[in-house]
Amino acid sequence: FMILPVGAKSFREALRMGVEVFHHLKSILKGKGYKTSVGDEGGFAPDLQSNEEAFTLIVEAIRKAGYRPGKDVGLGIDAAATEFYQNGFYFLKAEKKPRRTSAEMIAYYENLVKKFPILSIEDGLSEDDWKGWKAMTLRLGKKVQLVGDDLFVTHPKRLSRGIKEGVANAILIKPNQIGSLTETLEVIKMAQKAGYGTIISHRSGETEDTTIADLAVATCAGQIKTGATSRTDRVAKYNQLIRIEEGLGKRAVYKPPLRWRPKNSSE
């Protein structure tokens, strides 16, 4: 689960919003008796009853931080659906109906988008479920950002297929996944030319290297995914972005690229 500070006017403000929501969420979890230890990417991992409970708690944290869900801060999902896809079905053990088809998963996401201010869904279906991805893009592609991570694996051939088939509308970029900076830039250029959103991303088991922060600015990617504002390996990237913004001064332009806004945004 992620938050997207789409209402910020500068990166510094966006980061502050993220930090405030993070700490309010920690207080809420503590108050409800949940554990607040963090995982590899700096996020909380409490033993919740359902996915909807997670969204409800994050929305509460956004409001307690003084922001409007959907207007100032939206929600994002990294479903990593390949991990629970087997023999043509999706298995969600914590839900009332654990086994679902692609069509049922799409309907499930549609329902979540109606209930909560969700702006981005990453890997909503399996990396090999191209037919399902196309159907999901037709149903949800004009409402939310649909990000391919496992789907595209930062590879030009898979992205090219996605563009031709009208699959997804954004790509997660992991420089060390494709293997070289040259290939990374090629994929970013291809995606941007096709009108796809580009999100520069960290990996699990990160270091304090800040290259992806510079890459996000250099390519005008508009989005970066680098974990919660916790753990030095994650915070290092945010600090570098602040330094870049300060260095650019009045030339710095911060404009969140998401064009989607949920209808149920709270004022």
Image (cartoon, rainbow, N blue to C red):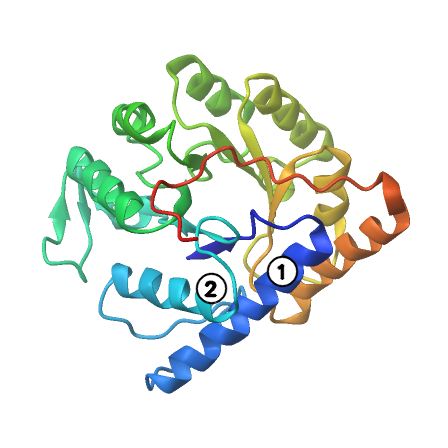
Residue 154 found in image quarter: top right
Q: Position of residue 250 (x, y in %)?
A: 87, 43
- The residue that mark 1 highlights is 206
Position of 100 relative to 188 (above/below): below
The residue under the point 58% across, 69% down is 20
Amino acid identity at mark 1: Glu
The three-letter code of the residue at mark 2 reads: Ile
Q: Is residue 112 above or below residue 147?
A: below
Spatial CA distance of label 1 from label 2 is: 27 Å
* Badge 1: residue crowd in 10 Å (few <14, some 14–19, many ≥20): some
Viewer-nearest residue: 252 or 90: 252
**Disc 1 vs disc 2: which is toward the camera?**
2
Q: Residue at x 77, y 45 (%)?
A: 214
Q: Position of residue 71 (x, y in %)?
A: 49, 48
**In this rendering, would 184 be left or right of 137?**
right
Q: Secondary structure at mark 2?
A: helix
Quadrant housing residue 90: top left
Query: Residue 235 in the image: x percent, y percent?
Result: 68, 65
Q: Which residue is mark 2?
A: 62
